[in-house]
Amino acid sequence: MRRDVFQAIADPTRRAIIALIALQSMTPNSIAEHFDTTRQAVSKHLRILTECELVKQEHKGREIYYTLELERMKEIDKWLEQFRKIWETRFSQLDILLETIQNQQKP
Amino acid sequence: MTTAHLQFDFIVDKAQNTITVRREFRANRQLVWDCHTKSELLDQWFAPQPFTTKTKHMDFSPGGYWHYAMIDPTGVEYWSRMDYETVQPVQGYTGLDGFSDADGALNTELPRAHWTATFSDLDAHTLVQTVVKYNSLSDLETVIQMGMQEGLTSTLERLDAFLLTLNS
């Protein structure tokens, strides 16, 4: 199942989880300790993040650790960066047009 | 010409599904307004190079629309349509931006974005703020992914070099 990745990061708890495990891989229990919600609620957030391929599970011995999918995070920023570039470019073009018109208006 | 000292903000609010773009222009408000609302001027800057803009229909008034294409260097046309909702001359306008075909029929399968553009004085310059709001951020993802599929990505990568020549 492929979930909506932006919906995943729109939730403040999920953003906080991402920020936490960006620093180091963590078990669900150690992640849950950072939040005032139930362990089940944290598990649900982790499941959504996993389905969006924003985090992945790693088995170490008997424990499961969650780590960040850095490439996927970069992908999102890349989309937004491209959108930004479109605007930057069209505005540079508008600068030139404005300058051209103003030069023509001068006597 | 340098644009280094002209204000430019690009703020993404993932919780509100909005992108706010603010830009300062070195011209008075009437001229900047004209460049945003007259198709013969829009055609000269709106599509990012190496795309060009072509207008088929423009009625800048509430209920009217701008029907235009962005054309890539091989001649492929990407049609869009901006339906204007409110217009307050030299102050701002709102509208719905969507994809269409060459005849102006709206593509209802693709997401539309709501635009709120506001024009204000910044000393002798003009500040334009455009808030682009999607119904959901997955809508934005769809729009950008489509752009990537249609080759916008490689085009944009070439843009870096182009921008350097502009600014040098």
Image (cartoon, rainbow, N blue to C red):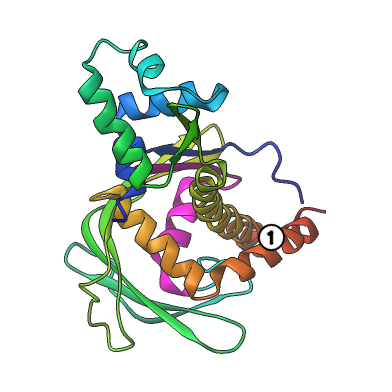
Q: Secondary structure at mark 1?
A: helix
Residue B149 vs B159, above or below: the answer is below
- Identify which amino acid the numbered label 1 is placed on: Asn
Q: Nearer the viewer, residue B168 or A59?
A: A59
Residue B26 visible: yes
Residue drawn at point x = 36 percent, y = 55 percent: B140
Chain letter for mark 1, please: A
- Residue B24 highlighted magenta (yes or no): yes
Q: Residue B120, percent across and down? A: 42, 38
Considering every residue shown, the one lying at the far right of the view is B168
Q: Residue A7, percent across and down? A: 29, 43
Q: Nearer the viewer, residue A55 or B140?
A: A55
Residue B91 visible: no
Q: Which residue is denoted by mark 1 in the rendering?
A: A103
Q: Is residue B138 left or right of residue A26?
A: left
- Residue B102 highlighted magenta (yes or no): no
Q: Quadrant of the C terminus of chain B?
A: bottom right
Q: Is residue B33 left or right of residue B115?
A: right
Considering every residue shown, the one lying at the far front of the view is A61
Q: Residue B91, percent across and down? A: 33, 45
Give, as a single range, the part of the protein colored magenta: B15-40
How many numbered discs sit on the rendered protein?
1
